[in-house]
Image (cartoon, helix red, strand yellow):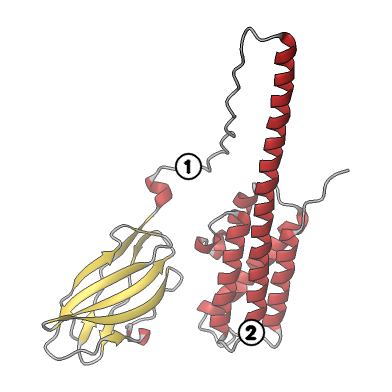
């Protein structure tokens, strides 16, 4: 096994969880090397896809016998990550150096979630000191009424915009989930697409980075996103979603022959998730 001498660079230089990152390894070879996509089967050992997602491995020609192997990936864990050696047939083996994935939370020294900032108050109006008492009272009443109406209109407009955004987010998620049932994909691909759709839906609906949250962290993520004040039906929906993620993670990452969906299981899984979305979207019941 011949190891190639390479020069490794990472873009961007500072890598954080969820960043689209490129690991570039430049090397020289006397014979011509075919540029383009390279199969991930060339890894000497199986990559640990629980730590990162690899989107592509390509070879680019740099000229004068120099080539660059570009490994595009997205890290999902902080700390040092290591890729297995990569063997280019009839060329040699590339060894990758460790890559450090930084934590934005640790760098900024954040210990807890920040509290809500108080809303900015509108500045008070000035009035003439020597204005008549009757005129002052009338102006004050008019000002208060306009202020109240303005706040009500702003609140109504923001609430309407938010409702439309939530409705569109729900409509897109349900449509995409139903569409998965008719797609001819492998169980692993179906599981990946299902999680992607649900993570994007939850991120918009609950304003929390679910696209960068591991399945093992979902329970705490739901609690943080709702402030621990979710109603019973939403709690049940969250638990069902976590169960679906655990099941699809098993199918995505397990090498077992049993890591496939049973007959009708995937359709039932999709229907349950649509019911969960409906439960999340339900208006909280008001106590009479």
Q: Quadrant of residue 177?
A: bottom right
Question: Can the viewer see residue 169 in this picture?
Answer: yes
Measured from the top left, where is residue 161 in percent x and y? 65, 53
Q: CA gap, disc 1 to disc 2?
A: 41 Å
Number of callouts in the render?
Answer: 2
> Which image quarter is the C terminus in?
top right
Q: Quadrant of residue 151?
A: top right
Q: Is residue 142 above or below residue 155?
A: above
Question: Can the viewer see residue 228 in this picture?
Answer: no
First in sequence: mark 1 vs mark 2? 1
Q: Which residue appears at 68% of the width and 36% of the height?
A: 150
Q: Which residue appears at 20% of the width and 86% of the height?
A: 92
Q: Which residue appears at 39% of the width and 44% of the height?
A: 108
Within 10 Å of the Cα at label 2, are there few (<14), some (14-19), or many (20+) other Cα atoms?
some
Q: Secondary structure at mark 2?
A: loop
> Which image quarter is the N terminus in?
bottom left
Measured from the top left, where is residue 224 in percent x and y? 60, 50
Q: Secondary structure at mark 1?
A: loop
Measured from the top left, where is residue 102 in percent x and y? 36, 55
Q: Which residue appears at 43% of the width and 68% of the height?
A: 51
Measured from the top left, where is residue 200 in percent x and y? 57, 65
- The residue to which callout 1 is attached is 111
Left or right of 54, for residue 220: right
Within 10 Å of the Cα at label 1, are there few (<14), some (14-19), or many (20+) other Cα atoms?
few
- The residue to which callout 2 is attached is 261
């Amino acid at each position: 096994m011949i190891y190639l001498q390479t020069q490794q660079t990472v873009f961007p230089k500072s890598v954080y969880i969820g960043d689209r990152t490129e690991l570039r390894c430049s090397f020289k070879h006397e014979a011509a090397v075919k540029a383009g996509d390279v199969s991930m089967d060339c890894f000497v050992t199986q990559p640990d896809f629980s730590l990162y997602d690899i989107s592509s491995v390509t070879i680019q020609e740099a000229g004068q016998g120099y080539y660059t192997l570009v490994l595009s990936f997205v890290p999902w864990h902080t700390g040092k990550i290591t890729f297995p050696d990569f063997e280019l047939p009839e060329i040699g083996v590339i060894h990758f150096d460790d890559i450090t994935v930084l934590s934005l939370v640790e760098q900024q020294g954040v210990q807890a979630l920040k509290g809500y900032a108080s809303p900015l108050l509108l500045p008070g109006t000035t009035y003439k000191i020597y204005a008549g008492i009757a005129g002052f009272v009338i102006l004050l009443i008019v000002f208060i009424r306009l202020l109240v109406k303005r706040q009500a209109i702003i609140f109504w407009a923001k609430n309407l915009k938010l409702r439309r955004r939530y409705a569109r987010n729900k409509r897109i998620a349900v449509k995409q989930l139903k569409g998965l049932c008719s797609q001819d994909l492998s169980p692993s691909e179906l599981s990946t697409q299902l999680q992607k759709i649900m993570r994007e839906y939850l991120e918009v609906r609950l304003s929390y980075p679910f696209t960068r949250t591991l399945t093992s962290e979902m329970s705490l993520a739901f609690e943080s996103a709702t402030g621990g004040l979710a109603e019973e039906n939403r709690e049940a929906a969250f638990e069902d979603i976590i169960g679906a993620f655990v099941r699809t993670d098993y199918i995505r990452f397990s090498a077992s022959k049993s890591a496939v969906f049973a007959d009708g299981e995937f359709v039932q899984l999709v229907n349950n998730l649509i019911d969960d979305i409906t439960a999340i979207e339900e208006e909280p019941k008001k106590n009479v």
